[in-house]
Image: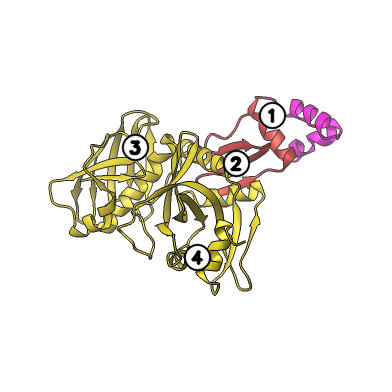
Amino acid sequence: MRYCGRLAHRVIKGSAFVVDPRAKVIHSLNPAASRIWELAGQGLGPEEIARVLSSEFAVSAPDASMPWKRY
Amino acid sequence: MCLDVGGFPVSLSSAAPFPPETRKRYGAFLTRGRAKLRLRLRSAAPPLPGGWRPRIRGRGGRLCCESSQFHLDLELAGSGAFAGRGRGDYAGSPQALDSLLRVLYSRLLPASGGVLLHAAAFRRQGAAYLFAGPSGAGKTTLMRKLSRAPGVRFLSDELVLLRREGSALTAHSTPFWGEFRQPENNGRAPLRRIFTLARSRTRTRIRPLAFSRAQSRLLRCLVGFSDEREPLEKGWDVIAGAALSHPPEELRWRKGESAESLLGKITGENP
């Protein structure tokens, strides 16, 4: 997994912000989404991210991977 | 002529003289110093081939900025330096030159630790108070009101240049005014407080903003004509640094409130 090259992003005080400069849209991510964004930036794949999320957010790995399956 | 906005000088030359209004408009920002960024411009009949919205394309140290008002090819001396050479055309009017300069500064500042913000600002007792807000938020109206209060020196009612200077953040006047024209003003001051601006029908109040909301609001006020990721992220770093050291607050202000009362609340002298 890797970031879309045109998106600007920063993780500040644990919260990720993503901006699409072309669309002029700012996304402020919630804590779980911020963590996913951070882990994706470290090069982790969906299964590894689900494993980390399940340990950090007290959800089962299948639940944590649900968003990946949906999207 | 050499124009210095916020400590970032640019030298402008042209075979034909610049419009006479230009010297008046930029008078307080003209300097005899030498600039490392030098532009050679020609006056051309409008419209130029670009669209009404400025576009910037860049690769490496080369940039092309264009709109129906100007076309500029720039060769930058290096990343992070406000230096290089440029050549281009502008539509011959003060507005076209102003548009070119706004685009130029907004694109080049972030690499040097500065940004242009849609904001008003004033200085009082050596400190700057900044009010970020889009068009219609009341920046000009607020500055008109506050400039009548004692000890207030107006910095801008439209675009403020915010820059990192060592560990401090400084707010600078720009010649890019809104409707409240005070061309003799060219000031600067270290930043003390940041507000986002909104109107209130009932009473003036100031409240802290959640960090994520403050980020979103300030980012929307970042002047950027470019679709490029890197300048946006560098400008963002300046804004995030400002928001971390000076947590933004929301100022909802009532138009009928007296300048003295409003000023007291803003500066904290009379909350």
Inspect this view and state whether residue B97 appears: no
- Disc 3 from disc 4: Cα separation: 34 Å
Give residue B44's position: percent from left, percent from top: 19, 52
Left or right: where B200 falls relative to B233: right
- The kind of secondary structure element at disc 1 is helix
Residue type at mark 2? Answer: Leu
- The kind of secondary structure element at disc 2 is helix
Boundaries of the magenta span? A44-71
Residue type at mark 1? Answer: Leu
- The kind of secondary structure element at disc 3 is strand
> Disc 3 sits on a residue from what chain?
B
- Residue drawn at the location 19% of the way across and 57% of the way down: B19
Q: Tag 4: Cα neighbours inside 10 Å, few (<14), some, or many (≥20)? A: many
Q: Tag 3: Cα neighbours inside 10 Å, few (<14), some, or many (≥20)? A: some
Residue type at mark 4? Answer: Gly
Q: Drawn colour of chain A?
A: red
Question: Which is more N-terminal, label 4 or label 3?
Answer: 3
Residue type at mark 3? Answer: Leu
Quarter containing the C terminus of chain B: bottom right
Residue at numbered disc 2 = B244
